[in-house]
C-alpha cells in the first residue's frame, strides 16, 4: 500500500521547483508580504454586474472604478504579451486579464507563478469578447507562495478519504463541499434566530462532568491533574440544562458538542453537535409541534423550499409530519405480532428469535420491542415521522404515561430511516427518577457500558421541584445532512474523525 501522505515522485519534483522559487523570493526581500488591503470580492462583483447586456465592456470601462482583489490563483493561460488568470476568494471566482505593456516586470514575474499561489490584483472592470466579466490588471503582487500543487481532480474512494483528511485542500478545489459548510453555518444561525424570536435563552453547560448523564452512551474519560480526579466528556447536556430549569430559566437551549465513545459510520462521529432545549409547562406533544415547525421554517428560510432529495429519496417537509406509536408501527410491519405480544416479554423473545435478533437475558419487553422496531421499521420511515410512546425501560429520563403502564410520553423523529430528534415530557418525580437511576446502575453492574450513573446532585435538584417541562434533542449534523442532501456525516463535518495515517505527512 502506498503511503497517502508521501507525494509521488512527480509531485516531489514540483515541490522542489516551488521551493527554489521561494528561495529566490526570499533573496529579493520579504517573501510573504502582509501590506495589501483587499477592498472587493469576486462574488460581489459577479452579482453586481451579472447583466451583460447592460454592463458591456464599454459601460464597465466607463465606470473608471479601481478595484482591489486578492485570492488564490486557480488557473492561468499565458499567451505571449497577454494572459488570462482565474482567482478565487471566499465569495467565488473572477477572471483577470493581464497585459505586458501595463504590468512591466510584474508580468514577467507572473509567468513564473504557480496555480495555488495567493496573489493581489488591482485593476478595472471589463468584459471579454466571450462575455466574461474580468479584471483588467494594472498591478499584481505575489502574496503567498504555494509549495504544494493542487490536485487536478479528486475522485474515487481513496481521494474521498483524502478530502476528509485534507479538508483544507477539499475546500479549495471542491465548490460543492465549500457550499455545504456555508449552508451549515446558515442553518445553525437560523435555528438560533428562530428560538431567540420565541423567547428562548441560549446557555452553556459544562463539557467535562463528574458524572456523565443525559443519555445512555459510553463516555470518554479524562483526568484533571490538579484535583486528581477523573472527568468525563459529556454525552449530553440534559441533566445540567434541567438543573437550570429547576432554577427558573423556563425556556432555554444550548447548541452543544457531545462526545460518545462508540463506533464510527456514515451516521456516527464520536464528536457531534446537538441542539437541546427545554420549555416549562409544555408536554411532548407541544415539543413535537415546535420541532416540526423549527425544521420546516429553517428549510424554507435557508433553502427557499421544503422539498429535498436525500440519498435518492424525495423528502417533503411541508405537510404535517406523521405521528405513529412505536407498538403500532411494529405491528404494522410485523403482522404476526399481536397487541398483547407488545408487552409480553416471552412472546417478544420468540419474535426476536424468529427475526434473528440477538437478545440478552436481562432485557425486558420494552428493550425487545425497541430492538424489533430498529430491525424492521426504522429503515422504512422515509417521510418525516414521529415515533411516540417509547417503553419506559429504554427511556430512563422520560415521564411515564399516566394511562399506559410501561410506556412514556416520548417521541423520536425519523427522516429517510435516520433518527433526527428525540424529545419527551421530562420526568420530574424525584423518587421515580431515583428508582430509574438505580435500575441503570444495576444494568451497568451487569456489564452495560452505556447505562447511566446515579446522579445524586440531580436528584437533589429535582427535590426542589422541576415544573412540568418538555425537552428536545435535535442532531445538528444529521439535520445538515438532510438539508444539504449529504450521504455521510463526514461530508458535513469540517474535520471528521479518521484513523491516524500510517506515517506523518511529508
Image (cartoon, rainbow, N blue to C red):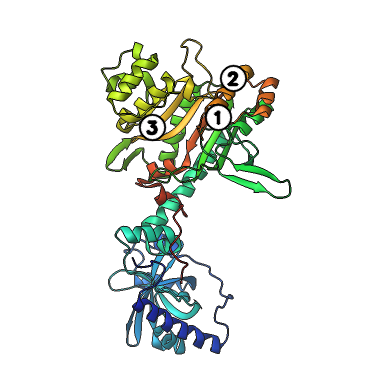
Callouts 1 and 2 close, C-beta under 8 Å: no
Q: Which mark is in front, 3 or 1?
A: 1
Q: Quadrant of residue 436?
A: top right
N-terminal of the two: label 3 or label 1? 3
Query: How many marks do you count on the picture?
Result: 3
How far apart marks 3 and 1 lie (CA) works out to 32 Å
Helix, strand or loop at mark 1: helix
Nearest the eye: 373 or 242: 373
Residue 95 in view (yes/no)? yes
Q: Mark 3 sits on what residue?
A: 414
Residue 55: percent from the left, percent from the top?
A: 36, 66
Q: Residue at left 40%, top 88%?
A: 101
For residue 435, the mark is 2
For residue 393, the mark is none
Q: Residue at left 34%, top 14%?
A: 341
Residue 248 in view (yes/no)? no
Nearest the eye: 171 or 305: 171
Residue furthest right as drawn: 226
Label 3: few (<14), some (14–19) or many (≥20) C-alpha neighbours in 10 Å: many
For residue 445, the mark is 1
N-terminal of the two: label 1 or label 2? 2
Nearest the eye: 46 or 268: 268
The N terminus - image quarter? bottom left
How far apart marks 1 and 2 lie (CA) works out to 15 Å
How far apart marks 2 and 3 lie (CA) works out to 30 Å
Amino acid at each position: 500500500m502506498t503511503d497517502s501522505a508521501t507525494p509521488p515522485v512527480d509531485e516531489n519534483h514540483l515541490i522542489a521547483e516551488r521551493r527554489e522559487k521561494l528561495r529566490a523570493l526570499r533573496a529579493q526581500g520579504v517573501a510573504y508580504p502582509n501590506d495589501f488591503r483587499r477592498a472587493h470580492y469576486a462574488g460581489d462583483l459577479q452579482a453586481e454586474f451579472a447583466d451583460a447586456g447592460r454592463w458591456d465592456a464599454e459601460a464597465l470601462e466607463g465606470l473608471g472604478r479601481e478595484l482591489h482583489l486578492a485570492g488564490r490563483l486557480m488557473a492561468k493561460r499565458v499567451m505571449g504579451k497577454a494572459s488570462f488568470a482565474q482567482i478565487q476568494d471566499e465569495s467565488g471566482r473572477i477572471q483577470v486579464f493581464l497585459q505586458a505593456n501595463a504590468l512591466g516586470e510584474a508580468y514577467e514575474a507572473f509567468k513564473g507563478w504557480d496555480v495555488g499561489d495567493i496573489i493581489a490584483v488591482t485593476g478595472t472592470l471589463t468584459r471579454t469578447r466571450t462575455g466574461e466579466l474580468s479584471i483588467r490588471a494594472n498591478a499584481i503582487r505575489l502574496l503567498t507562495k504555494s509549495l504544494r500543487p493542487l490536485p487536478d481532480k479528486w475522485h474515487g474512494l481513496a481521494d474521498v478519504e483524502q478530502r476528509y483528511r485534507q479538508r483544507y485542500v477539499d475546500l479549495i478545489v471542491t465548490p460543492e463541499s465549500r457550499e455545504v459548510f456555508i449552508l451549515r453555518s446558515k442553518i445553525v444561525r437560523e435555528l438560533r434566530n428562530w428560538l431567540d424570536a420565541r423567547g428562548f435563552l441560549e446557555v452553556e453547560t459544562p463539557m467535562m462532568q463528574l458524572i456523565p448523564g443525559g443519555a445512555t452512551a459510553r463516555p470518554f474519560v479524562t483526568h484533571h491533574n490538579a484535583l486528581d480526579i477523573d472527568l468525563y466528556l459529556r454525552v449530553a447536556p440534559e441533566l445540567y440544562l434541567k438543573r437550570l430549569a429547576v432554577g427558573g430559566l423556563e425556556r432555554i437551549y444550548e447548541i452543544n458538542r457531545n462526545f460518545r465513545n462508540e463506533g464510527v459510520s456514515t451516521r456516527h462521529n464520536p464528536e457531534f453537535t446537538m441542539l437541546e432545549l427545554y420549555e416549562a409547562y409544555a408536554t411532548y406533544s407541544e415539543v413535537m409541534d415546535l420541532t416540526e415547525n423549527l425544521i420546516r421554517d429553517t428549510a424554507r428560510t435557508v433553502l427557499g423550499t421544503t422539498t429535498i432529495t436525500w440519498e435518492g429519496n424525495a423528502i417533503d417537509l411541508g405537510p404535517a409530519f406523521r405521528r405513529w406509536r412505536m407498538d403500532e408501527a411494529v405491528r404494522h410491519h410485523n403482522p404476526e405480532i399481536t397487541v398483547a405480544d407488545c408487552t409480553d416479554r416471552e412472546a417478544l423473545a420468540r419474535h426476536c428469535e424468529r427475526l434473528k435478533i440477538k437478545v440478552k437475558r436481562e432485557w425486558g419487553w420494552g428493550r425487545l420491542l425497541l430492538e424489533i422496531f430498529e430491525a424492521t421499521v426504522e429503515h422504512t420511515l422515509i417521510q418525516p415521522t414521529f415515533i411516540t410512546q417509547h417503553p419506559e425501560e429504554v427511556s430512563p429520563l422520560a415521564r411515564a404515561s399516566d394511562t399506559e403502564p410501561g410506556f412514556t410520553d416520548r417521541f423520536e423523529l425519523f427522516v429517510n430511516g435516520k433518527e433526527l430528534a428525540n424529545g419527551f415530557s421530562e420526568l420530574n418525580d424525584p423518587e421515580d427518577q431515583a428508582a430509574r437511576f438505580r435500575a441503570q446502575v444495576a444494568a451497568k453492574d451487569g456489564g452495560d457500558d452505556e447505562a447511566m450513573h446515579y446522579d445524586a446532585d440531580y436528584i437533589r435538584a429535582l427535590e426542589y421541584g422541576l415544573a412540568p417541562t418538555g425537552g428536545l434533542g435535535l442532531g445538528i449534523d444529521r439535520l445538515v445532512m438532510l438539508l444539504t442532501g449529504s450521504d455521510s456525516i463526514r461530508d458535513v463535518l469540517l474535520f471528521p474523525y479518521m484513523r491516524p495515517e500510517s506515517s506523518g505527512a511529508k
